Amino acid sequence: MNDARPEKPKSSWINLLVDYGPLLVFFLAYRHFSPKEADAGIGTVVAVTKGTIAFMVATIVALIVSKWRLGRISPMLWLSTVLILGFGTLTVLLGDPFWIQIKPTAIYLLFAGVLFAGLVRGKPMLRTLLQSAFDGLDDAGWMKLSRNWAFFFLFLAALNEVLRHTLSFDGWLQAKLWGVTALSFLFTFAQIPMLLKHGLGAEAADEVEQNPPHD
């Protein structure tokens, strides 16, 4: 008798869409509304405001997609969404790009703080934040992964501060979308040998490659 159950959707592409889709929407909306002249003042503020609104809407859509397609919303996604909506609202109401630029720093520091607090208590909080259990990964592996991501989040927070102080808004946004995203994937790939030593199965390793934690 044939199994009539529908095939379970592959979560990797859904996670990528949920994690990075809103940021891409923000980038595209900002570029669409940004003025043609360099340093156009009020025109740039308007573009940032409209891009931020699109970002907030896309973030809510991503939350719905995660619940619909994956059947869950991870604590990490909940926390990110709350901060995006909070800092995004300040950006829109005050017309100041500072708030949306400082948002990644706040998210990175929050995640680092949660992970370090877990390490002090001997608990791998990354497993709780991701709401994932990679097949075969032991507690020591989760602890090491939590430790490594805690330090990496501190690095990303410092990097974001350097970028926003040294680049224009457009330069900062491009560095955030392309540079920081690439760094996150490279860092994730670098964790795989350690995870394999701690029992991570081949199928789970593929999932880790494609789904690094996000801001």
Image: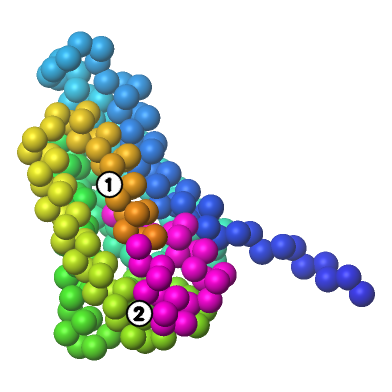
Q: Which residue is pictured at 27% across the width and 85% down the height?
A: 123
- Horizontal side, residue 45 vs residue 130: left or right: left
Residue annotated with mark 2: 142
Placement of 198 over or under 169, stated as above or below: below
Q: Main secondary structure of the magenta part?
A: helix
Disc 1 crowd rating (10 Å Cα; few below 14, some 14-19, many 20+) is some
Which residue is nearer to you in this view: 22 or 123? 123
Q: Position of residue 64 (x, y in %)?
A: 48, 54
Q: Position of residue 79 (x, y in %)?
A: 29, 62
Kindly give the residue lying farthest to the right in the view shown.
Answer: 1
Q: Position of residue 145 (x, y in %)?
A: 31, 74
Which residue is nearer to you in this view: 160 or 4? 160
Q: Which residues are magenta?
A: 190-215
Residue 1 falls in image quadrant: bottom right
Which mark, residue 99?
none
Mark 2 or mark 1: which comes first in sequence? Answer: 2
Q: Which residue is pictured at 72% across the width and 62% down the height?
A: 7
Residue type at the position of mark 1: Val
Check whether the beta carbons of the residues at disc 2 and disc 1 lie within 8 A of each other: no
How is colour applied across the structure in the image? Answer: rainbow
